[in-house]
Image (tube, rainbow, N blue to C red):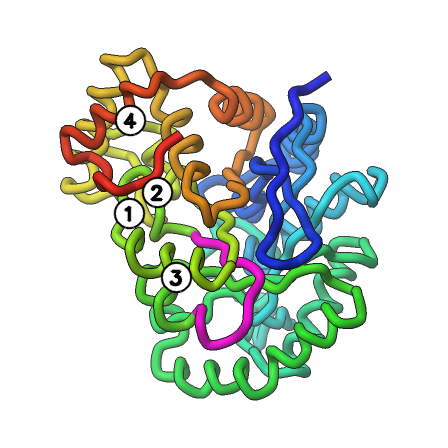
Amino acid sequence: MPKEFERRRVGQTAMTVPTFGYGAAHLGELYSLVTEADASATIDAAWDAGVRLFDTAPWYGLGLSEHRLGYGLRHRPRNEYQLITKVGRILERPFDPATFKSEMWLGGLPFQHRYDYSYDGIMRSYEQSMMRLGLNTIDALVIHDLDAAYQGPDFGYRKKDLVYSGIKALEELKRRGEIKAIGMGINTTEALETVAPLVDLDFVLVAMPYTLIDQGCLHTGMAECVKRKVSVIIGSPFASGILVTGSGGSANYNYSKAPEAVQAKVRGIEAVCKAHGVALPAAALQFVLAHPAVVSEIPGAVKPSEVTENVASHHAPIPAGFWSDLKAEGLIDKDAPTP
């Protein structure tokens, strides 16, 4: 039997989640193409390892991740796992299907998307997701990518759509018992500090602002989450790649090639890892869970071996001296909570 994961309560809801889940973004074929066989085998491996929290989104492969995750889960007992997906994008037939090509996803499905954070848009997104998943219940919905980098000049009115319209749809779904929790996906420290407080949330799904590399939001956004009793799920504990692959010319950070300053910091962390016999991925996964706001982490994987390695890293023993040495060398914030 796989070792069970600790469960933690989400915000002030009755929902509890395991501290370790599976993020299905890469099933949408971001960095590489993924065969249907590998996608199914990876979901099976997660299940066999005891993973019972799964996260996806319409954006991931323009529907492909939801299709694949639903296929991998719909024959499982529905009361034995929890499922999160996202709202804010509607998928549609392309203007020119013959020439359509995604600008973001290496593969994925041949649909274009448009943003819609209104009441009707969120309800339509929710319904579309259930159809793609082939499942008639979703445990939590996340407001996705409502930040200036994605929205550009439309950022202001889309915030208004959410505050004056869209949030009512999410609150209605929660009130009716269709979902158990409302979240928001956060990509930047600025969004954590300025966008997340716009509406009442149960949790935020933080992709990059809080990792073993960067704790710039420790005393601001993360502290505010503790104060407001808003939970945090860490969506990219490996900082989109470098904390699992290690430093090197091809390492990814924040979904692009890692800059030299980040590479240098990771080399410093790797040196401390070597001195203590600690694997870098284990340090990355266990560090974020020590913060009092964090209830779970959802690293991705595109092959069964990656899932089993991540689970092993989650459970691996790490000596206390490792964390104190990272602080002594200025590689993590001196005030950062550690295991």
x, y (%) of residue 175?
75, 72
Circles 2 and 1: CB distance less than 8 Å? yes
- Picture mark count: 4
Above-or-below relation of 304 to 138: above
Q: Which mark is residue 211?
A: 2
Q: Which numbered disc flags the more N-terminal residue, 1 or 3? A: 1
Q: Disc 2 to disc 1, how far (Cα)?
A: 6 Å
Q: Residue at x 54, y 80 (%)?
A: 162
Q: Amino acid at mark 2?
A: Thr
Q: Nearer the viewer, mark 3 or mark 2?
A: 3
Residue span colored magenta: 196-206
Q: Toward the viewer: 241 or 36? A: 241
- On whether residue 203 falls in the magenta region, the answer is yes
Residue annotated with mark 3: 224
Residue at disc 1, secondary structure? loop
x, y (%) of residue 273?
27, 19
Above-or-below relation of 213 to 205: above
Q: Which mark is residue 215?
A: 1
Residue annotated with mark 4: 323
Residue at disc 3, secondary structure? helix
Q: Amino acid at mark 4?
A: Trp
Q: Disc 4 to disc 3, how far (Cα)?
A: 24 Å
Q: Amino acid at mark 3?
A: Glu
Q: Disc 4 to disc 1, how far (Cα)?
A: 14 Å
Quarter of the figure with residue 4: top right
Give the position of the C terminus as an image quadrant.
top left
x, y (%) of residue 75?
85, 39
Circles 1 and 3: CB distance less than 8 Å? no
Q: Residue at x 54, y 75 (%)?
A: 114
Residue at disc 2, secondary structure? loop
